[in-house]
Amino acid sequence: MRRALREAEPGGATGPAASAALLVADRAGPPEDGRRTGGHVRARVVIGIHDLPFHQEVQDFLGRHPEIEIAASATDAERLAASLREVEPDAAIICPVLGRALGDRPGRETGAAMFLVAEELTVPVLRSAIEAGAQGAYRWPEERGELASVIPRVRRSRPSSPRTRGRVVAVFGACGGAGVTFLATHLAAAFADRGLRAVLVDMDPAYSGLSAVLGIGADEEPRTIADLLPVVEELSPDHVDQALLRHARGFGVLLASGPGETAGPTVPPGLYSASVALLAGDHDAVVLHVGRALEPVARSAIGLADRVLLVTGLDLLSLYGARRALAGSRATASPERFVVVVNRCRRSELTATDAERILGVRPASVLRCDPAVGRAQDRGELLPARSRRAWRDVKALAEMLTVPGEAEADGEGRVT
């Protein structure tokens, strides 16, 4: 985001760190409400940083800028929220700790542009920035100059039409053939059928099968995420939107590769993360198609998701793979974000009760065995909206996941 807010610089350096910090592009005009001093329009800023020495360092630096006015400061979430309401600043500079504490409240209530600062831009830090509604994340002190140059250009947005970011759902399977591609594609279609702006992102560059499932011919050359590499330094929502494939069922698709491609340009994980963050700012639902191997792209997908759907078939290989994935999730992510979906993709003597016994959690949803799935996939089509069985099960799951706060996983892995 930090570079998405400024004009592109010819010959600028590229890299995963730059793209990973892009969150929600907002090329703003001159501020309306700042105070004029010495011919400049000063942007009113609230600083909310938990660590006192870090807080003082940021305040001292920004306070010396001729176009920035420090209107208030806070070291705890309650005081920061109060300052945002009372001061009505143009921008707020927050740390990851207060970003997580505030969640999605302050920026939507006050219209202030949110910027996050941290000494390291890790995936959890980027997630905190997204949850706080931040327009940019900056590594301190290396990128403090860029932050200071962006703040005076921020225009306060009025709270006339507040908007929350879209819900990000990752679909992950610990074993090939579990039905990840089926669920991810149909979940995007189900969201679109509910009138939501939905997008599907392929985050499985090694084994991508979306092109075939979506019916993209071998002679077609659709845009993919690799088309964003030349603009990584000034990545914006428009750039990502132009790279989307428009599916007939009403959702967009950001492909990892085209049909028949076995190897293409290497795309850094940061570009995937940046694209997901930008899409979440412009869509109601973002579905991530995650590879079964937990390589960097897959790990970043799981880290950015609000909910991770762990798909398993009713066979021992798939179930024990899912059990290992659940055990690993406790060390790498919040276990409560994981919910289990059983896909009865073929007839089996095992039941959902057996799955619960092996996994130690009750499945949130069971997709029924449906011969129509194989026939549709052979034609490169999705199940029609009038289908029964599996399609109805996916629609019910989409309904549970639609509204943030209404589709939460309980301690036993059920969606409530």
Image (cartoon, grey):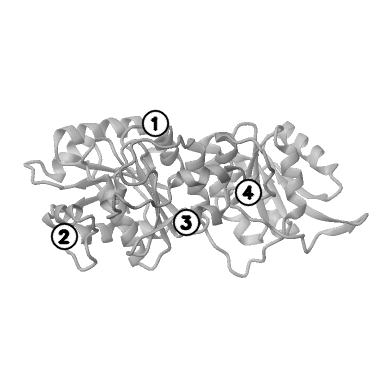
Could you tell which of marks 3 and 4 lies nearer the N-terminus? 4
Q: Position of residue 71 (x, y in %)?
A: 79, 52
Residue 257 visible in the picture: yes
| Circle 3 Cα neighbour tier, 10 Å, few/some/many (<14 / 14–19 / ≥20) | many
| Circle 4 Cα neighbour tier, 10 Å, few/some/many (<14 / 14–19 / ≥20) | many
| Along the viewing direction, whichever of 281 and 92 lies nearer the viewer | 281
Which residue was labeled with disc 3?
Answer: 166
| Circle 1 Cα neighbour tier, 10 Å, few/some/many (<14 / 14–19 / ≥20) | few
Could you tell which of marks 3 and 2 lies nearer the N-terminus? 3
Q: Are marks 2 and 1 in contact (CB under 8 Å)?
A: no
Which residue was labeled with disc 2?
Answer: 389
Q: CA distance from mark 2 to mark 1?
A: 34 Å
Q: Position of residue 393 (x, y in %)?
A: 22, 58
Q: Amino acid at mark 3?
A: Gly
Q: Helix, strand, or loop for circle 2?
A: loop
Q: Amino acid at mark 4?
A: Ala
Which residue was labeled with disc 4?
Answer: 4
